[in-house]
Image (tube, grey):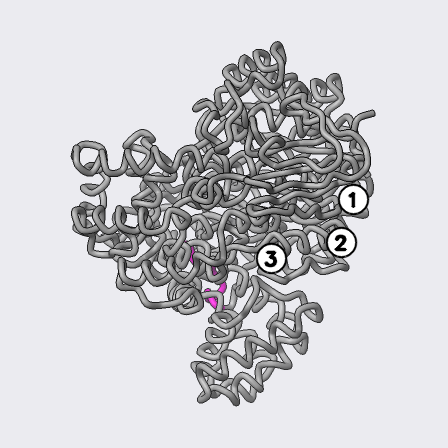
Amino acid sequence: MAVPTSTYRLQIRQQFPLSAAAEVADYLKTLGADAVYLSPILQATSGSDHGYDLTSHDRVDPERGGEQGRLDVVAKARELGLEVVVDIVPNHMGVADAAQNKAWWELLRLGSEGEHAAWFDVDWKAGGGRIKLPVLGDDFTDDQLTLEDGELRYFEHRFPIAPGTAPGGATPAEVHGRQHYELVSYRRADAEQNYRRFFAVTDLAGIRVENRAVFDATHAELLRWVSTGGVDGIRIDHPDGLANPAEYLEWLAAAAPDSWITVEKITEPGELLPEQWPVAGTTGYDALAEVNSLLYDPADEATASSRYRSLTGDDRDWGSHVAQGKRLVATTILHAELLRIGRAVRAAAPDLADGDELVVAALTELAVAFPVYRSYQPVGNEQLRAAVQLATSRKPELAGTFDALLPLLAGGDREVTVRFEQATGAIMAKGVEDTAYYRYNRAIGLNEVGGDPGSFGSTVAEFHAAQEQRQRLLPESMTTLSTHDTKRSEDVRARVAVLPELGERWYAAAEQLMQRCPLPDQSFGYLLWQTFVGAGWIEPERMHAYAEKAMREASAGTGWRDSDADFEAAVHAVVDRAYVDKEIYNLLDDLMAEVTPHGWSNSLSQKLVQLTMPGIPDVYQGTELFDYSLVDPDNRRPVDFDLRRQLLSELDSRPAHSVNSGRSSTPGLQLEMIGKAKLWLTACVLRLRRLHPDRFSSYTPLTAAGEAAEHVVAFDRGGAITVATRLPVGLQRAGGWHDTAVTLPNGRYRDDLTGHEYSGTVEVAVLLADYPVALLALSD
């Protein structure tokens, strides 16, 4: 298996096509990356900014560079000795414009008898033999339908016409009534949608890759790339949406036996990947959570919780927010999925038919109570039973229905089992990631994909235990700090992690801001001010765009479907005040200045830890410098590779220790605004991993001794030693490192960041005099 020593993720778009990826490959090589990691490149909906709405599996998207662009990337990578990793989307296809998706067009044209009927997961009976397409607006009238060029049209939407259904003189409405699809109000999707979607996105239709013929058809081009040497690694998007992830992965692994395969699987705390899956591991959200937790002191939790309650008036704990968010989406945007499971239950157990409403209510409660994204029966049966127990405690009147459903959900009926598993993942994603994460704002840096906002930091010992397990079970799993799906970039998280450490300095400032700029939802106001401190003075239009997405995701004062103009105007007015009101601006600016050096320290520490911990590190495009991006699409903005190339060249042309302008006993104070130190650190680690992969083959915790020992995280990977600072505010308040020291394993070690050499027991104040981190490589 070709396992890279590291990857560098590139977002391929019209503005950054494959030709551009080929042009930056030499920079990635110089940086030290071992693989070019490409976002989806198969043909997607025209104008797509992300590529996850693909419309064809048999060609590279011409808007992103086409086949020639792919070949250019592969050729350049091979010339430089780089591997190529691609991101694929097996779960769904883009159907926003039916005319762009041949398979979907044919399904609509020919219905359940067409050759593509097996591709899509449609409940034909529920639609009376028709696919319900929720595209009509609130003011729809029949005269808005037209017949043009042999198609049925509704404004910009185009639909095919079945053979023989449009005789001369027929009205558009009459023709519509004869089709294999029915255009319905977008509001009916919640309860009447009869094709499986990606979460609740009606423009993304689920496909049935559990059908071997569909798998073969949709993977032929990918496997051609593999067979011709154009792909070394495959990243699987959203495996939890698949009917049978294990079988799918077995097919893929058999077809691409030498490929490094990772899955975008979100695991909850304590949850492990099913050991039967033939994959190297996940795409790194679990690792992100482990590193992120190091930035928080569990001792600060009580104060953070108390002040959050007093500032916002929200006395709900994380578990309550999870249940409320999941119940919201289960009874609205994803209700159709539960109704479909209810119909499957009726078919499998007719004796439950008289209680259809009770069945759906019980399914809803079980989905809300489910502790992880999904199970994979029989794997995860204990999670199903835990959900039954919790749901029964919440709704004892449904106990009998829970008991009757349990055998079906545990594998007694395949359709019921699979559809419930698919639904719990979607409900978790939408109810937690896209709802509760924007409602529970005690410490927003913890509200990250794969994280657990209900916990508050971890000890160094807990981190070491997690890494020893990672080294033992998933040494080739990907690790990451930022992705196209993270709620905020790693450097924003590094800054907001400082706030609980500041304690009353932060809480008093937040109270002033919230009193001077009150919002109808004070919890959202608390999120907003944390975001300002984390992102800094980014362009106002970016902060406005973030605020709009965040408040609509929260679905508390406004929402995506029915927005509240007054609520949104109030939020936007507060954003404007931050930039133009001198008093508010100065209050924020002073706070940002205080946070900055500690945020830099956190940024470098978490970067070094992530790049050196067990697993294969990924660098998301541009994050080798400080990057203050927010949730997508903000994190897909263009990256200035020319600047990075220039800075790296400058760094390589001068002594390593001169990246910083002096030695300081206070970590972080000498770091440069542009993030050169982070660039240098990234290059040093990636180059060392590529040159000496054997030095990253084990994991041994190193324990510091002395007054500030709790501020050190250190470990030996087998000849490469990481030493990093944590909780920098507390360290500064304690007066620095004092007598704290680390004893190195036998041998002499060179700090790749500074060039200094060490052996034996070393005082941390000396070791971390230039940077808040050290990368020690065993001398040859």
Image spot of residue 621 (x, y percent)? 54, 30
Q: Which amino acid, mark 2?
A: Leu
* Range of magenta residues: 126-133
Magenta stretch, main secondary structure, is: loop
Residue annotated with mark 1: 698
User: Mark 3 vs mark 2: which is more N-terminal?
Assistant: 3
Q: Which mark is residue 96?
A: none
**Badge 1: residue crowd in 10 Å (few <14, some 14–19, many ≥20):** some
Image x and y of residue 690, in percent: 75, 28
Q: CA distance from mark 1 to mark 2?
A: 12 Å
Quadrant occupied by the C terminus:
top right
Left or right: 222, with 669 as reference point: right
Residue 239 appears left or right of 402: right
**Which residue, given by chain and number where applicable, does mark 2 sit on?**
473
Residue 357 position in % (x across, y down)? 43, 81
As displayed, is residue 36 above or below residue 110? above
Question: Which residue has dot 3 on it?
Answer: 267
Residue 621 seen by the camera = yes
The Cα atoms of the two marked residues, 3 and 2, are separated by: 15 Å
Q: Is residue 555 left or right of residue 160?
A: left
Between residue 683 and residue 253, name the one nearer to us.
683
Contact (Cβ within 8 Å) of mark 3 with mark 2? no
x, y (%) of residue 53? 51, 41
Q: Nearer the viewer, residue 513 or 35?
A: 513
Find numbered disc 1 in the image and state the secondary structure of the residue it sits on.
loop
Q: Which residue is outermost to the top?
A: 653
Mark 1 against mark 3, which lies toward the viewer? Answer: 1
Q: Nearer the viewer, mark 1 or mark 2?
A: 1
In the image, is residue 44 part of the stretch drawn in magenta? no
